[in-house]
Image: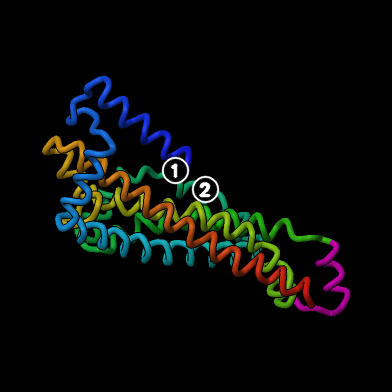
């Protein structure tokens, strides 16, 4: 926080000292003033982007985790489809988005598809790595004790992979906001992406920075929420196990 405050102070001082035009680079005070005075103009845009990001994040991460579980439990399927998993991330969203609009129109579906595409991959790859790095001696011991494959997965591999899964969730949490904004750029009637496009076309640089700051704030809030969940599910459970 101190570093951020220092950067904002230096930015404000530079704007005043070098008399930088507001249309080129507005000062933090000007941006904050615009953000407070124009709240009613973009509040509904912020709500729309937040809802879209959350829904897309939930769908994308759920699909990513499901794919990771299926590929882990079926090694031959993993060998066949893992390259396709990687290739899915090489499709430029700017190229894919117009096709989605042609196929599905300007509704919510193509936007959710874009967010899902950018969110599922980090979770899927992180979960697969977590499953693969499970202690081999513990797996061997459980099989010797008569555990089934399902029991080994639910009681050993899945808990062991939770830190890796949460690492993927942190990445996807920030990607979800980015995907929502990009999808709004390509076709929407509300959202932070729409607000930013309108501000840019009217040369309102201060409003563009307002949109940027709210995008950063959303990413930080989502990231903090995932960290809180991680502490609850991993560190909290570890503390309970230590007490027992």
| Residue 54, quarter of the rendered image | bottom left
Q: Is residue 186 visible?
A: no
Label 2: few (<14), some (14–19) or many (≥20) C-alpha neighbours in 10 Å? few
Q: Are marks 2 and 1 in contact (CB under 8 Å)?
A: yes
Residue annotated with mark 1? 90
Q: Which residue is mark 2?
A: 86
In terms of depth relative to the viewer, which is nearer, 18 or 196? Answer: 18
Q: Nearer the viewer, residue 39 or 208?
A: 39
Circle 1 SS class = helix
Q: Is residue 146 magenta?
A: yes
Is any part of residue 211 visible from this angle?
A: yes
Query: In front here: 100 or 39?
Result: 39
**What predominant SS class does the magenta segment belong to?**
helix
Which residue range is magenta in the image?
A: 137-148
State the residue at coordinates (64%, 59%).
163
| Magenta-drawn stretch contains 1 | no
Label 2: which secondary element:
helix
In percent of width and height, residue 179 lies at: 35, 51
């Amino acid at each position: 926080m101190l570093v951020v405050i220092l950067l904002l102070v230096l930015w404000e001082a530079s704007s005043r000292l070098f008399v930088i035009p507001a249309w080129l680079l507005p000062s933090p005070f000007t941006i904050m003033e615009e953000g407070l005075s124009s709240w009613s103009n973009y509040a509904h845009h912020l709500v729309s982007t937040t809802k879209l990001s959350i829904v897309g994040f939930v769908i994308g991460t759920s699909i990513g985790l499901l794919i990771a579980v299926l590929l882990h439990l079926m090694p031959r399927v993993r060998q066949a489809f893992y390259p396709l998993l990687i290739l899915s991330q090489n499709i430029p969203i700017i190229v894919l988005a117009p096709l989605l609009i042609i196929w599905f129109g300007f509704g919510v579906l193509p936007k959710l598809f874009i967010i899902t595409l950018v969110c599922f991959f980090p979770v899927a790859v992180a979960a697969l790595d977590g499953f693969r790095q499970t202690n081999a001696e513990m797996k061997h011991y459980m099989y010797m004790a008569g555990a089934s494959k399902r029991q080994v997965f639910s009681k050993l591999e899945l808990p062991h992979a939770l830190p890796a899964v949460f690492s993927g969730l942190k990445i996807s949490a920030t990607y979800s906001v980015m995907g929502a904004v990009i999808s709004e750029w390509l076709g929407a009637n509300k959202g932070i992406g729409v607000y930013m496009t309108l501000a840019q076309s009217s040369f309102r640089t201060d409003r563009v920075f307002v949109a940027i700051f709210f995008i950063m704030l959303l990413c930080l809030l989502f990231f903090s929420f995932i960290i809180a969940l991680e502490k609850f599910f991993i560190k909290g459970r570890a503390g309970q196990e230590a007490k027992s």
